[in-house]
Amino acid sequence: MDNKVTVDGLTFVPYITRDKIDREVKRVASELRADLKGASPLFLCVLNGAFMFAADLVREVGINDAHINFVKYSSYEGTSTTGKVKEIMGLTEDIEGMDVVVVEDIVDTGLTASMMVADLKKRNPRSIRFVTLLHKPESSKTGFQPDYVAFSIPPRFIIGYGLDLDGKARNLRDIYVIDED
């Protein structure tokens, strides 16, 4: 794992190693594979942050007739949430009768997740499962609980493995947290 990294004048330290990420991706994929047995699910990757997690997860789940599509929402500026959710790129395909698996990078306040699930339910899918790499239960404003969680973490700002600071540092293989020392 790399040592400290600096992005936009902020210093970050290692928090979750790639090995731990890989282990949790395999665990969550195994649970999903069992729960989706016989289904042809649609994996719905929430851009931009979930793209690495979604790629690893979908490969690991290994359902060959699964579909993948992408949506994009925004609620962050810099290191904090704005409290407002904007749909930037919505779902264009019909999901009626489908098993939908939302793949998100992080559930923080739960506002985006709650809004997405409510919108998806209006389209009459057979089922909706919500998977997140990271969950900050202490930050919840909605009580939203993902169906599958790789890591529960405290309310700290993190980067790496798809997560960013104003578009930067998504490429880091590990997950980093702001150095508070």
Image (cartoon, rainbow, N blue to C red):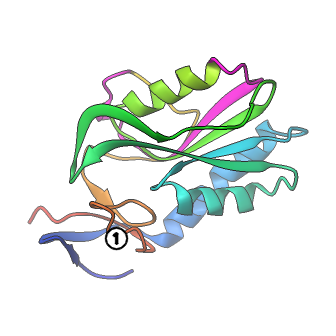
Observer-nearest of 11 and 82: 82
Kindly give the residue lying farthest to the bottom in the view shown: 2
Rendering coords of residue 38 (x, y %) = 91, 39
Q: What range of the chain is rendered magenta?
A: 122-142
Rendering coords of residue 163 (x, y %) = 39, 59
Q: Report if residue 137 lies within the magenta region.
A: yes
Q: Report if residue 57 lies within the magenta region.
A: no
> Callout 1: 10 Å neighbours few (<14), some, many (20+)?
many
Q: Look at the picture and state if 166 lies above or below 44.
A: below
Observer-nearest of 14 and 76: 76
Residue at (35% x, 47% y) in the render: 153
Query: Based on the displayed image, in which of its 4 quarters is residue 93 positioned?
Result: top right
Q: Is residue 116 left or right of residue 11?
A: right
Residue at (28% x, 81% y) in the render: 3
Q: Look at the picture and state if 18 lies above or below 125.
A: below
In the rendered view of the protein, which quadrant contains the C terminus?
bottom left
Residue at (12% x, 61% y) in the render: 180
Q: Look at the picture and state if 79 lies above or below 111.
A: below
In the rendered view of the protein, which quadrant contains the N terminus?
bottom left
Q: Residue type at mark 1?
A: Ala
Observer-nearest of 13 and 92: 92
Rendering coords of residue 31 (x, y %) = 71, 44
Element at label 1: loop
Q: How many marks?
A: 1
Residue at (46% x, 55% y) in the render: 48
Kindly give the residue lying farthest to the right in the view shown: 38
Identify residue for label 1.
169
